[in-house]
Amino acid sequence: MNTASRFANQTAIVTGGLSGIGLAVVRRLRREGATVAIFDFETKPLAAAGGKPLVDELVLKVDVTNEAQVQEAVATVLAKLGRIDILVNSAGVTGKTNVKSHEVSLADFDFVLRTNVYGTFLTSKHVLPTMLAQGYGRILNLASMAGKEGNAGMAAYSSSKAAVIALTKVQGKEYAETGVTINALAPAVIQTPMVDAMPPAQVKANTDKIPMKRCGTLDEVAAMITFIVSPEASFTTGFTFDLSGGRAVY
Ligand SMILES: NC(=O)c1ccc[n+]([C@@H]2O[C@H](COP(=O)([O-])OP(=O)(O)OC[C@H]3O[C@@H](n4cnc5c(N)ncnc54)[C@H](O)[C@@H]3O)[C@@H](O)[C@H]2O)c1
């Protein structure tokens, strides 16, 4: 199929779209015809867009843990673009890693759960009514290998991603007959600013477990995500796709 027009006339929201995986997805969606809105609470990574102005983008300063901000941003997208076909939930944080559970502060645990779980819940909550009215939608949540296996040293992060996987299963069932699919993706290590900020010992511990003995690339993530949110991916919902270089074979 002609992938250049795969998302023609479609509109997408990508949270965390100014960095790493989110940014790679924004670029690929735009290249294939989508109009993309970005929800991100940072403004600094704008430079990471390659210096190119994000002309047809709506770059909205949104903290995905804040329901009022999410609601207002979704309304803005609808007012400007008229529909929402795709939601990619890529906003996420690791919190402090390379620490054992008894060393994790409640504040850090709370921060990670809020961003990764509440953020995913809130954006889907406010986008779903539009997708249901359209009778079409694709939601993709960034989970992680940590949520399937539980990475030592990453109690808050692993717990939060397990919750994202469970939320995806629930929503997949709830909306299975509506034309809206909700899936997750569980990558192993992908070299992004998030991974750059982690202690090298934690990154090595995670990367050593990958049978392909390398990190995944942003191109590989974007290719997988854009398939999952494409019209072609119509008979899979509630599922957590694998992107782990052979680490998880279930
Ligand atoms: N990089 C990896 O190896 C890896 C592996 C598995 C899963 N993931 C998941 O993929 C997603 C993206 O990761 P990444 O490596 O691209 O990270 P990143 O740090 O490069 O980008 C995350 C983006 O989310 C934004 N963000 C964070 N909290 C936010 C909030 N409350 N509201 C709005 N925006 C917020 C940040 O500003 C940033 O632009 C995350 O959910 C992460 O957990 C990443």
Image (cartoon, rainbow, N blue to C red):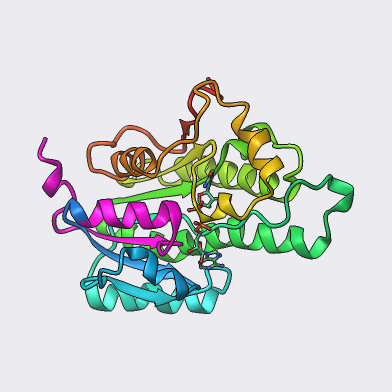
Q: Residue at x 61, y 55 (%)?
A: 197
Q: Is residue 130 above or below residue 207?
A: below
- Between residue 181 and residue 176, name the one nearer to us: 181
Q: Is residue 43 left or right of residue 100?
A: left
- Between residue 83 and residue 36, name the one nearer to us: 36
- Between residue 32 and residue 241, name the one nearer to us: 32
- Between residue 95 and residue 98, name the one nearer to us: 98
Residue 61 percent across, percent down from the top left: 44, 77
Q: Is residue 106 above or below residue 167?
A: below
Which contiguous range is marked in magenta?
1-30
Q: Is residue 188 visible?
A: yes
Residue 223 occupies which quadrant of the picture? Answer: top left
Q: Is residue 201 left or right of residue 30?
A: right
Q: Residue at x 38, y 64 (%)?
A: 48
Residue 109 percent across, percent down from the top left: 75, 58
Q: Residue at x 16, y 46 (%)?
A: 6
Please, which residue is most extreme toward the right here?
Answer: 102
Specify the quadrant that holds the N terminus.
Answer: top left
Q: Is residue 250 visible?
A: no
Specify the quadrant that holds the C terminus.
Answer: top right
Q: Is residue 73 left or right of residue 204?
A: left
Q: Is residue 73 above or below residue 188?
A: below
